[in-house]
Amino acid sequence: MSQKHLLLLFTIFASLSCNHYSASKKKQWTVIWQPSHQTDTGKDFSEAATCNGIVEGAMAAEPALKEFKVWSLGRKDLHHADSGSNTKQLHTTAIIDNKISGYAWELQEANKKDPDVFIAVHNNGGTKRNAVWGYIHYGDKYEAANRELAARLTRAIAAVSGMEDRGVLLDSTTGRNDYRCSVTGKLAFYSLDEQVNRATYRVLLEIGDNAASHDYLVDPSNQKAMGTAIKKELASWMKDHRTN
């Protein structure tokens, strides 16, 4: 074999080896799930239980990801660990009896994992709509990507549940908050604020209404079906957006 052919084979081998190394070193995305910890939401209804059922269904579904759940329910070293609103300073940033809130603890735990994607799962109330809503943070650097992710997830949930897809809204539009983003000054959801949450992509899902969707939401098989649909669509979205 000539020296020229040897050099060509070496170049091809080196290129293949480099590509294999790059593929093997590709970063595995970290996903954080945050089910609601609210137990005081509606008659004969625990938002914490239904949302945790959805999240557990998602985490159990294929494909397996590098994923973690942050959930403060039952912790006695926190205030508002089983109640409170993601939109209220009292329930998020306040220190009470030298304790941080359940929401603050959940975000601290999430940030320790250096997350790429953060999905909060809640149920709505008082809407009289059997529907699903997606929320993203106003003025976010990744607002367009977050909007796409939220829209794909709400469509997936609507398809499997029969709920009305109410689309994607900004967290500054609910009107019930007093928590504000320190950068924009706008009303915001604590869990979606980039000053609090280090994940690149952040979405909050309001799945169903605790009255209008009550019977559907409390059924474990429905929770599993919705979780599976969320996981499948999330994996598809991640594949579309994956980078080295």
Image (cartoon, helix red, strand yellow):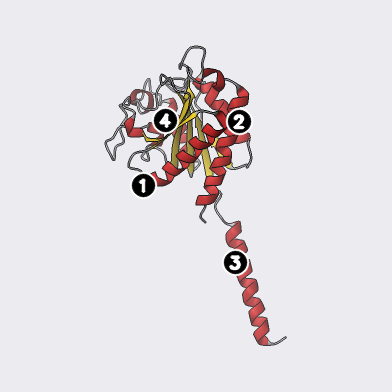
Q: Where is residue 93? Give x, y as percent.
A: 35, 28
Q: Nearer the viewer, mark 1 or mark 4?
A: 1
Q: Position of residue 198 (x, y in %)?
A: 42, 42
Categorize mark 4 by other alpha carbons within 10 Å: few (<14), some (14-19), many (20+): many
Q: Is any atom of residue 115 visible in this view?
A: no
Residue 225: mark in rendering: 2
Q: Nearer the viewer, mark 3 or mark 2?
A: 2
The reply to whether callout 2 and callout 4 are in contact (CB within 8 Å) is no
Q: Amino acid at mark 3?
A: Cys
* Amino acid at dot 2: Ala
Q: Circle 3 sits on which residue?
A: 18
For the residues labelled 1 and 4, say whether their Cβ atoms are less than 8 Å apart.
Answer: no
Tell me which corner region of the image, top left, top right, bottom left or bottom right, holds residue 21: bottom right
Horizontal and vertical percent position of residue 99: 40, 24
In terms of depth relative to the viewer, which is nearer, 173 or 115? 173
Q: Please name which of the two marks, 2 or 1, marks the residue nearer to the observer.
A: 2
On the rendered structure, is 75 left or right of 224? left
Q: Secondary structure at mark 4?
A: helix
In front of the other: 92 or 153: 153
Q: Earlier in the sequence, mark 2 or mark 1?
A: 1
Between residue 208 and residue 36, name the one nearer to us.
208
Q: The residue under label 4 is which amino acid type?
A: Ala
Q: Position of residue 30 (x, y in %)?
A: 53, 44
Instruction: Give the residue at x 38% y 24%.
Output: 91
How far is the residue under mark 3 from the one under mark 2? 41 Å
Residue ID for mark 4? 104
